[in-house]
Amino acid sequence: MTVRLRFVRTTERLHRQDPYLLEFEAAVVARRQHDGRPALILDRTAFYAESGGQPWDTGALGEARVLAVIEAGADVLHVLDREVAAERVHGRVDPYRRRDHMQQHHGQHLLSKAFVDVAQATTVAFHLGGEDTTVDLDRLVGEEQARSAERLANDVVWQARPVRVSSLTAAQARAAGFDPPEGVVADIRIVEAEGFDRQPCGGTHPRTTAEVGVVVITALERYKGGSRVHFVCGGRALAAFARRQQVLDQLVSTLSAPLDELAATAGKLKEDLAASERRAKALLERALEGDARRLLADAQGPGPAPTVSSPAVVVARFDGWPAEELRLLATQLVALAPAVALLGSRSDKAHLVFAQSEGLPNDVPALLKAAVEHLGGRGGGRGNLAQGGGDRVERLDEALARARASLAAR
Ligand SMILES: [Zn+2]
């Protein structure tokens, strides 16, 4: 008898009859290892194993934590954090996680049916994650259709319709319009929200639709030619509302604007910022042009104005200038008069920008390459403008002096 049982045993899934059963006694049938952890097979279990888009339950078997519950053929594998020596165990399913999964999963049934009714959109995938829950629809739905489906699903929730579980043979299931996979001979479990939705499912579902609480769509995106709908139900909806409320409260306080005016205030701030940035850029260009004229005058001294055959050479080193501003200054310099600009700045690293006016004979990229190599860095450019930098900040003056010494003879 014992031997025969060993071959025909199947773990009895208590949650299929009663999803509210959270404590149970069971006998240990086999001990296994799973990814280096001990795992038990029991004669009966109230733990739901991951399947059909619904994650596994967690909880405890005796003193051991149940880390994962996995379908293993006819059996259910309970993966534990420690060995259990006893032959009989007391099981406790985590009630919060179970209720959360029931709310999300049943909410999904209702929302999926609502999308069929509202937009003839069929659910092709369901994912119940730790935070995010999604259904993928076979066709693109719009914002308004999504809101209609959401309203319909919530109507059904608030009507507190009874939820029933029944079982059909594969033939009965086909006759009833379901499409069990080829080769399925076992009974098909049907979950029905009275008068609204009926579908094959092995998941844990509540007694009435009311337990879903509320269904809230949080995002809608295009996905594989259809739509992906993100949603939260029940307790997750409450948590999502609290998170959003916290963010809004912070924004109301930071922007000193009431909730209803937040969007307009943020929009205005963004416009103001863009205008300030444009003004700052114009001022910077004016300031740099002044710097460029002063540097040229210093380089020229009392002598004649620079020409293409006798250009001004400006060598200057700044502290803390970003490379972008060095480049703007160099561009201004070589545009104002025939000139070579060898500019450097030191901050966390050393920056170099070299430039020359149109028609001058230096190989600017080669000059820059030699200089940045001296700084232990890299850089490049084309034609009359090149820039780069290196970490050896203490060599910056030397790099500039060397570049100046290698300029083409006038
Ligand atoms: Zn289901």
Image (cartoon, rainbow, N blue to C red):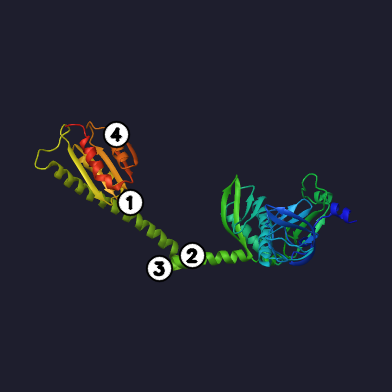
Q: State yes or no: discs 3 and 2 in contact (Cβ < 8 Å).
A: no
CA neighbours of label 2 inside 10 A, class few (<14), some (14 to 19), many (20+): few
Q: Is residue 254 left or right of residue 219?
A: left
Q: Nearer the viewer, mark 3 or mark 2?
A: 2
Give the farthest residue toward the right. 1
Q: Nearer the viewer, mark 1 or mark 2?
A: 1
Indicate the position of residue 347 as horizontal and vertical percent values.
Answer: 30, 51
- Identify residue type, mark 3: Ser
Q: Earlier in the sequence, mark 1 or mark 2?
A: 2
Instruction: Please say if the residues under marks 1 and 2 sit with CB atoms less than 8 Å apart.
Output: no
Disc 1 element: loop
Q: Position of residue 142 (x, y in %)?
A: 58, 52
Q: Classify residue 35 as left or right of residue 326.
A: right
**Three-letter amino acid code at disc 1?**
Asp
User: What residue is pinned by disc 1?
Assistant: 348
- Marks 4 and 3, Cα distance to the nearest angstrom? 55 Å
Q: CA distance from mark 4 to mark 2?
A: 53 Å
Q: CA distance from mark 3 to mark 2?
A: 14 Å
Residue 277's spot in the image, x, y percent? Answer: 32, 54
What amino acid is labelled 4 in the image? Ala
Q: Quadrant of the C terminus?
A: top left
Q: Measure the alpha-carbon separation of dots 1 and 4.
A: 25 Å
How far is mark 1 from mark 2, CA to CA? 35 Å
Do labels 4 and 3 touch, CB within 8 Å?
A: no
Q: Is mark 4 within 8 Å of ligand 1?
A: no
Binning the other alpha carbons within 10 Å of mark 1 as few (below 14), some (14 to 19) or many (20 upward) gives few
Mark 4 lies on residue: 366
Q: Residues within 10 Å of mark 3 (few under 14, many from 20)?
A: few
Identified by mark 2, the residue type is: Val
What residue sits right under mark 3 in the picture? 256
Labelled disc at residue 247: 2
- Sequence-wise, which precedes: disc 3 or disc 1? 3
